[in-house]
Amino acid sequence: MHTVMWPELLFFIYKTAFVMVKAYAQEHIYKHPWERVTSASWRKFADPENKRTLSHILEVDTLNRKLDPLSGKLYTTRALTIHAPGPWFVRKIIGQDICHCVESTVVDAQSKSMQLTTRNVSLQKFIEVEEKIRYDPHPDNPTGWTICRQETSIRIKPLSTLASMAEKVEQRCAERFMQNSVKGREVMERICKYLEAESSGMAL
């Protein structure tokens, strides 16, 4: 497994009188072809054996899937129910343990690009989170490796009950998201190895 932080681990804090945003970016190289990695991405939440590792994901439902006949791009929208982000005291303040999110995915098989954007649709009066993930063939080995770039931004609403502790909450949320990212990559690597063995007629 080869992980590269972008450039190591980037943290950006934007502070104004009205907004405070913590954002970070990560980069990971899968030593598997793009087709296998994107297949693993679709199966990440679907396979029952992954539920223990990805315990923060409670439910995933496909809302819409459409193939554009002109561009050949596949557009998919899924609803995700997850444990509310952040430490326990944040969940106590906001009075909720779960958060609802919407994931929008665009797959361009012709150019070999897969882009996922996830945003929370509940708890927006307290916090806004946006995560972007992109899978592309690695420029050094486009037929054998895939590069994954992930960007996440966390914004505490300035007038919410969390505003007075915004920086601490954003930092703790960022730490939690990074931990979940590691778990997600572990699951992706495991599925990729399974698909590799499956295509070779071997059983893991």
Image (cartoon, rainbow, N blue to C red):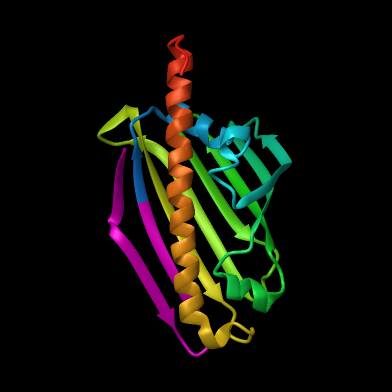
Return the residue nearer the eye: 89 or 154. 89
Residue 171 location, quadrant = bottom left
Give me the residue at 40% from left, 38% from top: 136
Q: Is residue 15 left or right of residue 97?
A: left
- The residue under the point 37% across, 54% down is 26
**Image position of 163 with respect to 115: above or below:** below
Q: Is residue 87 left or right of residue 83?
A: left
Which quadrant, please, contains the N terminus? Answer: top left
- Side of 157 relative to 198 (left or right): right
> What residue range appears in magenta?
1-26
Q: Is residue 22 visible?
A: yes
At 52% from the left edge and 57% from the top edge, which residue is drawn?
131
The main secondary structure of the magenta stretch is strand
**Residue 167 lies within the magenta run:** no
Between 72 and 136, the one nearer to me in the picture: 136
- x%, y% of residue 179? 45, 55
